[in-house]
Amino acid sequence: MSISKAAAIVGAAEANEIGYPDEPRTSLQLHIEAIKNVSDYTGIPISAIEGVFSTAWSSDLAEHLGLHPKYIDTTAVGGCSFEMHVHHALCAIYAGVIDVALVSHGENGWSQRRVGREGGPSYPAHRDAPGVQMTIPYGFSGPPSQYAHAMVRHNHDFGTTPEDFAHVSVVTREWAMKNPRAVMFNDETHEFGGPITIDDVNNSRLITWPLTMLHCCLQTDHGGAVLIARPEIARDLKTNPVWIAGAGESMSHSTILETDDFTATSAALSAKSAYEMAGLGPKDMESAMIYDSFTVTAAITAEMLGLAPRGDGYKLWKDGTAAPGGKLPINTNGGGLSFNHSGMYGMHLLVEAYRQLSGTAEDGINGIKGKQTNARTCVVNGTGGLLSTTGTLVLTSD
Amino acid sequence: MPGKKPLPQPSPLTRVFWEGTSEGKLMLPKCNACNRIHWYPRYICPHCHSMDLTWVEGSGEGTLHTFAVQHRAFGGWAEEAPYVTAYIDLKEGDRMATVLRGVDPTKPESIKIGTPVKVEFEEMDDGLFVPFWRVEDAA
Ligand SMILES: [Zn+2]
């Protein structure tokens, strides 16, 4: 048996309340709710989980659940960690070490300001790490302060403009308007929710030139979990399996100072591995879930995944290819830009890819009419750190 | 009250660099095996994996690789916003981060990638000298 499709994602679920909950949530709570929900959804008891894959949380989660797992993975390299966890779970199942794997995420990107996180990884400054020493004196703040440099260089190299990238934000909002769980679903879920225009993106508050607020993702609460099982188990469940046809991961750098090319990411490498394992290529992809921390992240990544020529990633959104009804639907949950973004968005990609390929994207709660696509293949790409690490999956339905 | 600007904590690996800045020198790590410069400082050459490394004084010249204008800033930087952050291609090779001087943050369109820049040093809190890069006035 080949490693391609040696395991399937057999279910995906989210925490009960995500977004900006009235009652603050903790990260641990978001994890546990999602795990309970995916167990109920698949019918796989929590006690049957043999491998726990999460960021630095894995041992805390296993303890909280009373598990004694055979396989513990704490890969924590930013928002793409969860795509890598799926890759690692596939390998562990293919190797015969485990039969059932849990990949879990919980992060109270919003509520942590009020109640803390209740454990798990944070991002220590490492003020004495040599790469950090050489960037810390220069007034960079959060991720927008760095990703803006990528857009400026892309504009220079390819003749693009910030307005070109604004189309990513506008089209992604169209998808969010089909997802009642999206923060920006309408003007009742958020004062700035509902439809937006290119002018709205251009005229929103300047964060780091040329990135305005609507070029940047949200910061909300989100928890999600998926269960992965070997084919014999997957075929016996009440849920539809989504096959892990290909998986790959890579990195270009850890410290952004080490970026060779501000207009590229290692997704070119991780996608090559994933496509090769799957025996499929970009032209076979009927949908895509792409980490959109910023409009520029999504557009550059589309180029890296081979979905558009170099420099032209934004055109997928501008010409409607990625939009509802388009030939290659992208980020059908409303993306990190308009659905939710907890801080490490990779799990949100997995949940939506599962929903689309299992035919459950339009359940009324997580999607209304017009959200379910006909796609039977999906390329999923997470980006972690500051354009640093990437994990790519090629998923297929029966 | 404005906070302090964050500063690095020099370590054994970077001590020569931070001693150099206090004397107005931009010290760069160089590999004796492949003769290439690398930035940031390392215990091993990232190009050829030799551990035979030395320090050389850099020219302090470079060109602008890319930049952005920070409108939202915190702590000691808050009152300076907007200001221009940038990455500089060193004449000797590899790339440094900086806050770019000699440019107008309110006119980002006037800032050109590829523009020549020169290093200067500023004494910060705790007596640490930090290198910054400046676009020289067109003569
Ligand atoms: Zn060398």
Image: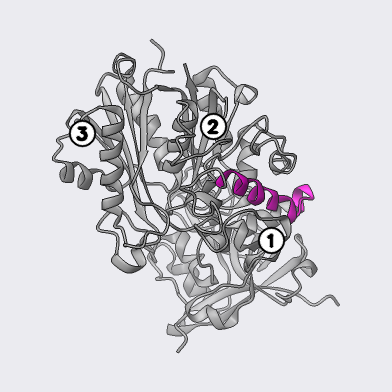
Is A88 in the magenta?
Answer: no
Whether residue B63 is visible, yes or no, is no
Q: Which residue is mark 3?
A: A46
- To which chain does the residue with label 2 belong? A
Q: Nearer the viewer, residue A104 or B37?
A: A104
Whether residue A236 is visible, yes or no, is yes
Q: Which residue is mark 1?
A: A200
Q: CA distance from mark 3 to mark 2?
A: 29 Å
Residue located at (46% from left, 62% from top): A132
Q: Nearer the viewer, residue A219 or B28?
A: A219
Q: From the viewer's perspective, is the residue at label 1 or at label 3 nearer?
A: 1
Label 1 sits on a secondary structure element that is helix
Residue located at (45% from left, 74% from top): B7
Residue A246, horizontal then vertical, whole percent: 48, 24
Quadrant in which the N terminus of chain A is drawn: top left
Precedes in sequence: disc 1 or disc 2: 1
Amino acid type, label 3: Ile
- Badge number at residue A124: none
- What segment is highlighted magenta in the picture? A156-176
Amino acid type, label 1: Asp
Residue B94, horizontal then vertical, whole percent: 61, 55
Residue A195, horizontal then vertical, whole percent: 64, 53
